[in-house]
Amino acid sequence: MRTSKDGKEFNQIAYQNDYKREKYDRMELLLPKGRKEILKKKAKAAGVSMSEYINSLLEKELG
């Protein structure tokens, strides 16, 4: 584990979790069976993560 300038241990996972909690909202999305697989394939074809793909669809719809 790395140490910071003040000599304390740096916890990368805790840092990432804190960053996500500060910068992003989370929500659960329930889909009909089979829809997730369709989204996965479309995201992969677009060369992005499923999250990025869904966000791009929402951006188009919501502006």
Image: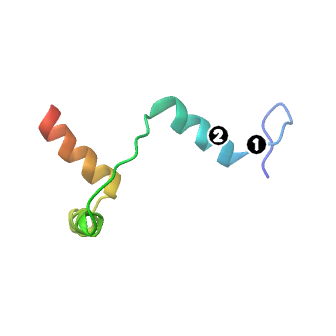
Q: Residue at 44% x, 35% y: name it.
A: 24
Location of residue 49 by image quarter: bottom left
Q: Is residue 2 above or below residue 19?
A: below
Location of residue 55 by image quarter: top left
Numbered tag placed on residue 10 in the rendering: 1
SS class, disc 2: helix
Instruction: Identify which amino acid the numbered label 2 is placed on.
Output: Tyr
Q: Residue at 44% x, 39% y: name it.
A: 26
User: Closest to the observer: 61 or 47?
Assistant: 61
Numbered tag placed on residue 39 in the rendering: none
User: Closest to the observer: 47 or 62?
Assistant: 62
Q: Is residue 1 above or below residue 41?
A: above
Q: Give the CA separation, mark 1 to mark 2.
A: 8 Å
Q: Residue at 30% x, 59% y: name it.
A: 48
SS class, disc 1: loop
Query: Is 63 on the left-hand or right-hand side of 36?
Result: left
| Category of crowding for the residue at label 2, using alpha-carbon neighbours closer than 10 angstroms: few (below 14), some (14–19), many (at least 20) | few
Instruction: Identify which amino acid the numbered label 1 is placed on.
Output: Phe
Q: Earlier in the sequence, mark 1 or mark 2?
A: 1
Residue contact between numbered discs 1 and 2, judged by CB atoms under 8 Å: yes
Give residue 18's position: percent from left, percent from top.
Answer: 60, 35
Residue designated by label 2: 15
